[in-house]
Amino acid sequence: MDTQTIHMLIQQGLPDAVIQVQGDDGVHFEALIVSPAFAGKLPLARHRMVYATLGERMGGEIHALALRTLTPEEHARQQATQQQAR
C-alpha cells in the first residue's frame, strides 16, 4: 500500500475532501482529511466515514492509520491559531 492509493480511495469516498497522506514504510500512515461532510459529527463518526472508504484494507494492507478529521472551518481556525503563534 502507498500514500497515493490511500489518497485516491479516500477521495473516491469523500470527493469534496482535501486530503494529505504520509507514511514511508508501506503499512503505517497518517492522514489529514478536511471535509464539509464532517460537520456536526463526532470524531468517531468521522473516522468511521474514512475507514469505510478503505474497506477491508484497514487492518490488512494498512496496519495503522492515524487520522485528523476536520471541517473546513475547524481547519481554518487551526491554521489561524498556528500563524498567530509564530
Image (cartoon, rainbow, N blue to C red):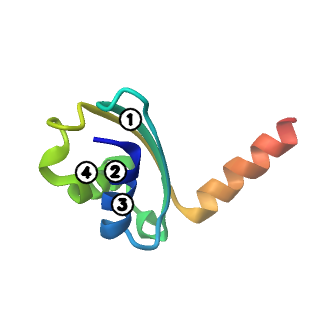
Q: Position of residue 31 (x, y in %)?
A: 45, 44
Quick one: SS at disc 2?
helix
Label 2 environment density (alpha carbons within 10 Å; few <14, some 14–19, many ≥20)? many
Tell me which numbered mark, 4 or 2, is placed earlier along the sequence.
2
- Mark found first going from the N terminus, 1 or 3: 3
Residue 18: x percent and y percent?
52, 62
Q: Which amino acid type is marked by label 4?
A: Tyr
SS under mark 4: helix
Please say if the residues under marks 2 and 3 sit with CB atoms less than 8 Å apart. Answer: yes
Q: Residues within 10 Å of mark 1 (few under 14, many from 20)?
A: many
Above or below: residue 27 compared with residue 78:
above
Residue at image position (30%, 59%) is 9
Foreground: disc 4 or disc 2: 2
Q: Is 82 above or below relative to 24?
A: below
* Element on which disc 1 rests: strand
Question: Between residues 43 and 6, which one lies in front from this camera angle?
Answer: 6
Indicate which disc residue 29 carries: 1
Asked if labels 2 and 1 touch by Cβ distance under 8 angstroms, the answer is yes
Q: Residue at x 16, y 53 (%)?
A: 55
| Residue under numbered circle 3 | 8
Q: Which residue, given by chain and number where applicable, does mark 4 sit on?
A: 51
Q: Residue at x 29, y 30 (%)?
A: 27
Q: CA distance from mark 4 to mark 3?
A: 13 Å
Identify the disc placed on residue 6. 2
Q: Which quarter shows the C terminus?
A: top right
Q: Earlier in the sequence, mark 4 or mark 3?
A: 3
Q: Image point 14% across, 36% down: which residue?
A: 60
Discs 1/4, front: 1
Nearer the observer: mark 1 or 3; the answer is: 3
